[in-house]
Image (cartoon, rainbow, N blue to C red):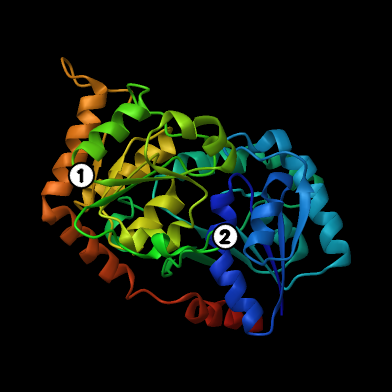
Amino acid sequence: MKILFTVGGSQAAVFGVAPLAAAARSAGHQIMLAADEPLMAAAASVGLPAVCITSERMRYGQESMTATARLDALLGLTANWTPDVVVGGLSHVPRVLAAHLGIPYVRHIWHIAPMARRDRAAVAELRPELERLGLDELPEPDLFIDLCPPPIRPEGAPAARAMRWVPRVSQQRVEPWMYTRPEGRPRVLITAGTRNLMLDTPGSSLRKLVDELTATGAEVLIAALPEAAEKYGAELGDVRIGWIPLDVVAPTCDLAVHHGGATTAMTLVNSGVPQLIIPDNGYGKAVAEAVASAGAAIVVDRNRPQEGRDPDEVIAAGCREILADPAYAARTRALAAEAATLPTPGEVLRELEALVAS
């Protein structure tokens, strides 16, 4: 079987499909990942064969701006490498491709934020591409795979095949401090993911947050892009900063402060780490509120400051609360345990195989 995986946007999309793609490859299937140029390095870092279909990163919510170029690139790819099934994500362009080829389409996403309105708008914007290919309408996905654990799925989310979240990130040489919990002190991780150089706190004072945390006796790690470490490392005091494999270090942490990325949040949930989330966009806010609804996080919304309170102090107080109250860790571990009961990528792959066989 030949499976075409398609992603766009951020590296998180690559890391999200990597476990299922790796399971398919290990089962003897041929796979190909079609992605944006900025995602090529991420694909290589997790061992996925990838082909570039656009030179710039696709932005969700602006699908019509790049739909023609992306679809033409996919049509060119599949003229020479004909898949038996297409696996797509938030974008609906791969759904157009599958309908044109007359093969099954599988949607593979985190349904952690309400998307019905955006989906309807995106499908409407693709009407010119449908007409160009002689298609009347887009069929529903033949299989919908959701990485979001049921307890934190949004209300009214469509029925889906839940799949266990398996962390997959770019790696580097692992050092003992990455997998060893410090003795006698908590460990706090701060990260802004791969989209931003550094976490933008409401008070714009990451150094102040670091100082507040170290004052409690905590060890502070900052997982950041190499260029962020070079630019800001000297300003942040006695912390470890740089590219840190999140899946390795997460089990050693007592708290994580981050921007609301789905990959970041799910990797931390998987390791039972409570979170303080400062969303950097609407999607991050949805992620934050979902994790908080399970009692596994505190949300600090930069757009809704608490009257009379310094934003930096609000963040610091939230960190102190999580570190002092074991209930946050207990609730996060309970969520992790429930998520661990979901079908593995290998189990879900069998459903995909049956879909193609039928």
Q: Earlier in the sequence, mark 1 or mark 2?
A: 2
Toward which corner of the image does residue 26 lie, by quadrant? bottom right
Q: Amino acid at mark 2?
A: Gln
As drawn, is 300 to the left or to the right of 346?
left
Q: Where is residue 257 drawn, in percent x and y?
A: 33, 42
Q: Which residue is at a point 43% across and 63% down the rendered structure image?
A: 248
**Which sits in the foreground, 134 or 312?**
312
Q: Is residue 23 above or below residue 239?
A: below
Label 2 crowd (10 A; few <14 / some 14-19 / many >=20):
few
Q: Residue at x 30, y 62 (%)?
A: 181
Residue 207 disc label? none
Q: Quadrant of the C terminus?
A: bottom right
Q: Is residue 265 visible?
A: yes
Residue 333 on image: x %, y %: 23, 64
- Does 24 sit above or below residue 225? below
Q: Amino acid at mark 1?
A: Gly
Q: Residue at x 17, y 53 (%)?
A: 328
Numbered disc 1: secondary structure: loop
Q: Is residue 203 left or right of residue 218?
A: right
Give how far across and how far down residue 220 sits, in percent: 33, 45
Q: Mark 1 = which residue?
A: 217
| Residue topped by disc 2 | 172
For label 1, the crowd category at 10 Å Cα-Cα, with few meaning under 14, some 14 to 19 and many 20 or more, is few
In the rendered view, does 25 fall on the left or right side of 190?
Answer: right
Which is nearer the eye, 115 or 43?
A: 43
The location of residue 326, given as percent across then percent down, is: 12, 55
Q: CA distance from mark 1 to mark 2?
A: 28 Å
Q: Quadrant of the N terminus?
A: bottom right
Which of discs 1 and 2 lies nearer the camera? The answer is: 1
